[in-house]
Amino acid sequence: MGLALLFPGQGAQFVGMGADLYRSHPPSKSIFDRASEQVDFDLLGVCFEGPEEALAKTAACQVAIYVTSLAAWGFWKEQTATPEPAVSAGLSLGEYTALTIAGALSFEEGLDLVSRRGALMQKACEERPGTMASVIGLSAEAVEGALEGVDGVVQVANYNSPSQVVLTGEEGAVRRAADRCKEMGAKRVLELSVAGAYHSPLMKPAEEALRPRLAEASIRPPTHPVILNVTGRESKDPELIRDGLIRQVTSPVRWSESMSRLRDLGVDGAIEMGPGRILRGLMRQIDRGLPVESLCSMESIQAEGK
């Protein structure tokens, strides 16, 4: 059996995530405590107590999801005798988690990069406002065609599944493109409640500010292949990984392509390790025959390990 480990990105967070692991699993408590000492906000308070508005801030939620996912993974490893996964992948922010569990990044290096990334993206959102919209029921090719000739900054942020594509960019441009998608037969177009235009040219200041930090980051060959968001293909090359993390800030996330690649790598099952069930839901749209278990709580992890 080939197993894939999948890690969620921003938007999967919820108040209270990881609290059971923190209270009852000393290694998980150590992960949260080490992270708390390294970041400049009250990670434990925001993650376990909220409020939701505080946790939703880009600078906070990216760190919180990264730490919670790693705590869950550590507990899962203790509970199971599962061998090294065939491959791992993470949606946007989740790519850093996937690289950490594969040994390409140390916990401290990954945390520092995630913390900087979140703060820089939040700053870019404030300086260059934008929005995002989910287009459902229209092919990627059709959505790309709808963007042609639209005035303003707008592009695809996420190729989430064959029937779900996310737009990103300036508010007016995204809304004009969304209207075109509706005219072309989209079943639904939903403007997302987000702080800004992630994975768009409006994030260029964040990309440029993060570039020198990533250039000096210690990235080792991972112990198993990690699928990169920007290519939809696996890699064990530290320099390709570094380049992918830099480009990821302003480039589309090719999640549908990434998940379709799992079959070619011999994967017949996957675990979504971390908060939420977003990746499980997307997989049902991409490949209903590939089962995904969503694990985050101690109870769910213990049940899976039996």
Image: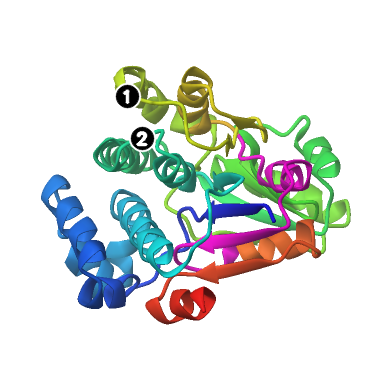
Q: Which residue lies furthest to the right in this view?
A: 185
Residue 303 or residue 131, whichever sits in front: 303
x 37%, y 57%: residue: 65
Q: Which amino acid does label 2 sit on?
A: Leu
Q: Quadrant of residue 113?
A: top left
Q: In which quarter of the image is residue 190?
A: bottom right
| Residue matched to label 2 | 105
Estimate the x, y position of residue 275 in percent, counting from the top left.
Answer: 45, 66
The colour scheme is: rainbow
x 29%, y 72%: residue: 21
Task: Give the CA separation, mark 1 to mark 2.
Answer: 7 Å
- Residue 17 appears in the rendering: yes
Q: What residue type is labelled 1?
A: Ser
Above or below 262: residue 49: below
| 195 with respect to 109 (left or right) | right
Q: What stretch is highlighted in magenta?
A: 252-278
Q: Does the magenta stretch include residue 259?
A: yes
- Say if mark 1 contacts mark 2, CB within 8 Å: yes
Residue 101 has which mark?
none
| Residue matched to label 1 | 218
Estimate the x, y position of residue 81 in percent, counting from the top left.
Answer: 49, 63
Quadrant of image for the N terminus: bottom right
| 275 with respect to 22 (left or right) | right
x 36%, y 66%: residue: 75
Residue 272 or residue 131, whichever sits in front: 272
Estimate the x, y position of residue 68 in percent, counting from the top left.
Answer: 34, 61
- Sort mark 2 into few (<14), some (14-19) or many (20+) by Cα contacts within 10 Å: many
Residue 55 or residue 290, whichever sits in front: 290
SS at badge 1: loop
